[in-house]
Image: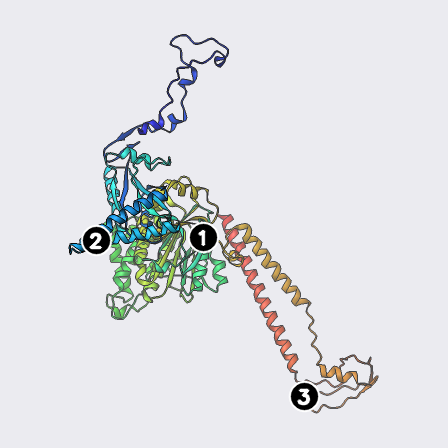
Amino acid sequence: MNILDLFKKPAKSSVQPEASQLGGQEKPVNGAKPFVEGLVSVKDIIAPSALEVDFDHVRIDGKYYRTCFVAGYPRFVGLNWLSGLINFDASQRVAMYIYPTDGKEILDDLRRKIAEMEAEISTDVQRGKVVNPSTQAKLEDALTLQADLVRGEERFFQFGLYVTVEATTKDELNRMTKNLEAALGSIMLVSKKATLQMEEGFITTLPLCDDKLAISRNMDTTSLATTFPFVSSDLSDDKGIMYGINEHNGSLVIFDRFSMQNYNSVVFASAGAGKSYMIKLEAMRSLMFGTEIIVIDPENEYEVLAEAVGGQYIAFGFGENSKINPFDLSLTVEEGENTLNDKVLTLHKMFKIMLGAMDPMEESVLDRAVMEAYKAKGITPDPETQTREPPLVEDLYKALIGMENERAQNLAARMEKYIKGSFAGIFNQKTTVNLQNKFVVFGIRNLEESLRPVAMHIVLDYIWTVVKKELKKRILIVDEAWYLMQFEDSASFLRGIVKRGRKYYLGVTTITQDVDDFLQTPYGKEIVTNSSIQILLKQHSAAIDLIGSTFYLSEGEKQLLLTADKGEGIFFAGQNHVAIKVIASEEEHKLITSNPEEVMKNKKEFEMKLETKLQETKSQPTNLQVPNNFQETSSKLQTEVKVETKPPALGNFVEPKEEPKKEVKLEEGKSVSFKPVVEIEEPESEVESDLKKRIAIMEEEERLKITEHSKKITKENEEKEKEEKR
């Protein structure tokens, strides 16, 4: 059958339509045609505009296709032995044809083959020849198969395996074919191109269940069962953290990122798809296994989580106390090493973000001014001088002003807004930050949009310096990484950290929702290729084609990403990938959710609990409990008790006032409290002192909670007022 036969129109019928079929009219005259014959059918719509069949490929609508068949198989196979083919890094169609065969015919053929091989071996022995080891192995396999078939433990099948690859150019098709043959060769499969049968091969791999090539090999039930590729969709490790549930089979996705060749990951998702939710969950669970977490947070989404786990939250802004001096050398200095030159190179990248593009002459002037600023503080390339107090951005500004050069004055004018203008006081301060916690969050929400790339670059430089100084298991989370990808220098700096982080036991998690801008830069593509874990959550239809071409997604996987719910997507780990659904416990969900409705609900619940505790504290009786021994004694007293004023034997004596004797009526079996005429300062009993301490502690705790709550409300109101003014 020709491939065009699939789209042929049905042949014209010689039967003429009856009059009733023509609306009651008579038969058409000669030359007239039925109306329906001119309409466009479904086959006309789906048929390709052009089709070319060559001896080694098929070209349809500008795409090249080539089909290969498997001609040789290994003698022994194991579980998931086709994973190399299933995980082949290219767009492909794999077709498997399985034909059950009659057991009686197979047993007859086996009996004949066994007799032939036994005769061959017997002849070689009689002639004194060495028995052919290949014949001996085949005989053993045939005898084993014969026994299994007779007992009914195995059935016999014919199995055909075909693969069709596609490419946009012929050179790319040749390259992909070589890679496919190499991948099949690595699992002991011998593949051949369906030369001069490309049309039949193309039809064979279409979902028509029509094997035009009919190239098969015999297989028993056990061997055939190992060819099913379902095992590759499992991603459960014996160590690591749980990321979610495998939507293919319901198993847990447990993985350790530090077991891969590098420890980096990238997360791509549209707004509201749950990317921050997933990474916060990963950070919290990794923290439980002793991994240090460092976060660059542009939207203050990690503040609640940091407070809950006892972390350190460092906020940057106009009114904040946290500052980082970009000129600081205190962390980089090591005994006998000159770190000044590395710091100067980093400063060049930062000032390109702050001041914009510079020509070579301006870069030279800036370099000279930076060195003069350090020199003014007594810091030179000599390592012994690099422990002194570093300069500030203001010192560089003064050095540029003092040069009396047109280019220097131009740079100083562009820098002035950071010294005296609207951005003053943010980057022109001494370093006050000190990382002393296992969970550290740098919040930059209070900064203007134009300042965020600069702040993220300074924070990244500071973190990278800390990471290089001491080797620890760390994860660095860079949220909204597209801020850094806007500038070539900051993108290059992030790319450098991603590529070099493995040497310092650092895994970098890059999160972004602006997929187009991120992947269209060469630095963005390098970050993706240097990340062993890639997580794709719900995508927008405008970005799905770019995502599909970058990660070689099938049409089904693209559709999955377009229709995914919140927290659903595809999890890539090395050569394997699965559909994943992120889940969290109720307690984890309360800490990591960023849904405004749920955040407000949790806030109200906390305020109600706080109010209830305050009311309980106020309603608690402050009277001290009378000791039991006193009650027992009082129950034995007479109905009338006379109290006389006598000086106490112990305690500090106070001059009593003249008062008459008092009589107190007591009911039998009840305690009494009375004020003696003599006022003394008696020492407190253990019960009384313990109760007083507890009450004091409770009052102090409630007072602190109320103070913190009022501060938080005041801060939120101030931020709202600032936003309204803007």
Q: Is residue 604 left or right of residue 509?
A: right
Name the residue: 44% across, 42% down: 562
Of 238 and 563, the residue lying toward us: 238
Q: Is residue 632 above or below residue 21?
A: below
Q: Is residue 377 left or right of residue 452?
A: left
Q: Is residue 711 above or below residue 564?
A: below
Q: Is residue 541 above or below residue 115?
A: above
- Which residue was labeled with disc 1? 276
What is the number of the mark on residue 122?
2
Instruction: Answer with mark 3 or mark 1, whichever residue precedes in sequence.
Output: 1
Which three-letter amino acid code belongs to the residue tagged 2?
Ser
Instruction: Answer with mark 2 or mark 1, whichever residue precedes in sequence.
Output: 2
Report x, y in % for residue 645. 77, 88
Name the residue: 42% across, 13% down: 16
Alpha carbons under labels 2 and 1: distance apart? 73 Å
SS under mark 3: loop
